[in-house]
């Protein structure tokens, strides 16, 4: 059985292997031992903290095979983007010019460096092993973060965003970066993303131009990358789109990938998840796949199970499922159909 839980310091060696296998552009999962160690410690402190509003906390989850204790994926929730350091994006909106004498009004799409998305909750660090792509376990890895938000709404913002990795070639080259960022840093795309992972974005973003960049002046190869998703990032996009997230006018300042946005109360796994009483039963099982979680903090757990359940009825789980969720017979459980 697979279960999602908070990361622990003992996960560091396996987590670094996940980082090595992750997609270029997932800068929140750096292949750097000390950086990962600090992220794990910060996450442990976040789960242990007693907070009443969203702050700098980062909640780091791992997907574990309980039988083999092998880690098969990870995902994160940063309570507040831009709390400790600026959170930069590129705003993609028309710049309108007008001539009254010629009776002409013309809008040209332009990219502007901004911090508009600061203060939103940020989903990041999604990575799943290839063997689990497009499976219920991959769905759980992404959506269980949202169930955690549903259980602890005071810890998060009223809006949630995520940046989807933009297009780059198999050789690790980004046409968008080559047309824009590379002119301000003598760095290839993969190296720029690596530096963001082991340090932060701020020092790179602060060297980006502060004036609007007119999109038609970029090469066509770069223009078509604006809002384009890397093929390996499509699943992350699809899962959250089904949750009610939508693209907006913001893109990643390095690879041009899209940003997804949703109001927290309207996200499907938050708005539609329900709590019920878990009962120990030898006759568990059913025809519908459900995502289940407890509402704990440091002992948060989530699993996927097949159930036959109706509202206002107990959730029948076997001993293995209750143990995976770290629940006792009669404890509350949160659930939603996949």
Image (cartoon, rainbow, N blue to C red):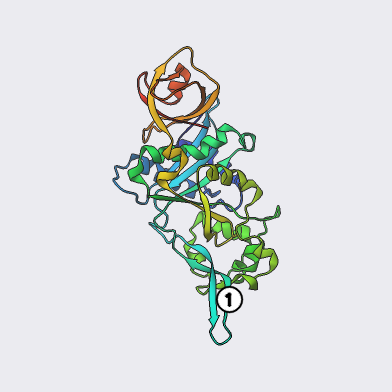
On screen, residue 154 versus residue 237, left or right, reads left
- Considering only vertical position in the picture, is 229 above or below 93? above
Question: Residue at the location (52% across, 64% down)?
Answer: 90
Question: Residue at the location (48% across, 58% down)?
Answer: 200
**Which x, y percent locates residue 173?**
67, 59
Question: Residue at the location (44% across, 45% down)?
Answer: 77
Q: Residue at the far top: name it.
A: 282
- Considering only vertical position in the picture, is 222 above or below 331? below
Q: Between residue 38 and residue 147, name the one nearer to us.
A: 147
Q: Residue at the far bottom: name it.
A: 101
- Considering only vertical position in the picture, is 48 above or below 110? above
| Number of numbered discs | 1
**Which x, y percent locates residue 205?**
50, 65
Q: Give the crowd class for mark 1: few <14, some 14-19, many >=20 residues within 10 Å.
A: few
Question: Which residue is the site of mark 1?
Answer: 106
On screen, residue 154 versus residue 182, left or right, reads left
Q: Between residue 126 and residue 95, name the one nearer to us.
A: 95
On screen, residue 237 versus residue 146, left or right, reads right
> Can see residue 201?
yes
Label 1: element kind:
strand
> Can see residue 13?
no
Question: Residue at the location (59% across, 60% down)?
Answer: 256
**Which x, y percent locates residue 326?**
40, 25
- Considering only vertical position in the picture, is 245 above or below 61? below
**Which x, y percent locates residue 130?**
64, 38
Q: Between residue 195 and residue 112, name the one nearer to us.
A: 112
Q: Residue at the far front: name it.
A: 103
The quadrant in which residue 190 appears is bottom right
């Amino acid at each position: 059985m697979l279960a999602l839980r908070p990361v622990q310091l003992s996960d560091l060696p396996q987590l670094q292997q996940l980082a090595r296998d992750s997609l270029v552009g997932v800068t929140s999962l750096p292949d750097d031992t000390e950086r990962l160690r600090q992220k794990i410690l910060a996450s442990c402190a976040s789960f242990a903290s007693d907070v009443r509003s969203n702050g700098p906390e980062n909640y780091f989850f791992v997907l574990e095979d309980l039988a083999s204790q092998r880690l098969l994926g990870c995902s994160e929730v940063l309570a507040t983007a831009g709390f400790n350091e600026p959170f930069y994006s590129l705003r993609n909106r028309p710049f309108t010019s007008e001539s009254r004498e010629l009776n002409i009004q013309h809008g040209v799409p332009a990219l502007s460096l901004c911090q508009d998305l600061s203060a939103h909750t940020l989903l990041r660090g999604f990575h799943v092993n290839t063997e689990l792509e497009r499976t219920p376990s991959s769905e759980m890895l992404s959506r269980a973060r949202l169930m955690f938000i549903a259980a602890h709404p005071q810890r998060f913002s009223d809006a949630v965003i995520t940046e989807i990795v933009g297009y780059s070639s198999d050789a690790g080259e980004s046409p968008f970066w080559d047309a824009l960022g590379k002119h301000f840093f003598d760095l290839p795309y993969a190296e720029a993303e690596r530096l963001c992972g082991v340090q932060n974005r701020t020092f790179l973003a602060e060297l980006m131009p502060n004036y609007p960049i007119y999109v038609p002046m970029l090469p066509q190869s770069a223009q078509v990358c604006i809002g384009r998703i890397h093929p390996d990032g499509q699943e992350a996009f699809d899962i959250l789109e089904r949750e009610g997230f939508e693209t907006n006018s913001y893109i990643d300042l390095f690879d041009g990938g899209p940003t997804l946005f949703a109001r927290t109360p309207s996200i499907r796994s938050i708005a539609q998840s329900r709590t019920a009483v878990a009962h120990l039963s030898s006759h568990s099982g059913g025809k519908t796949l459900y995502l289940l979680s407890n509402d704990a903090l440091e002992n948060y757990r989530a699993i996927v199970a097949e159930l036959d359940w109706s509202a206002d009825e107990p959730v029948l789980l076997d001993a293995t499922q209750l143990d995976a969720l770290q629940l006792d017979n009669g404890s509350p459980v949160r659930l939603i159909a996949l």
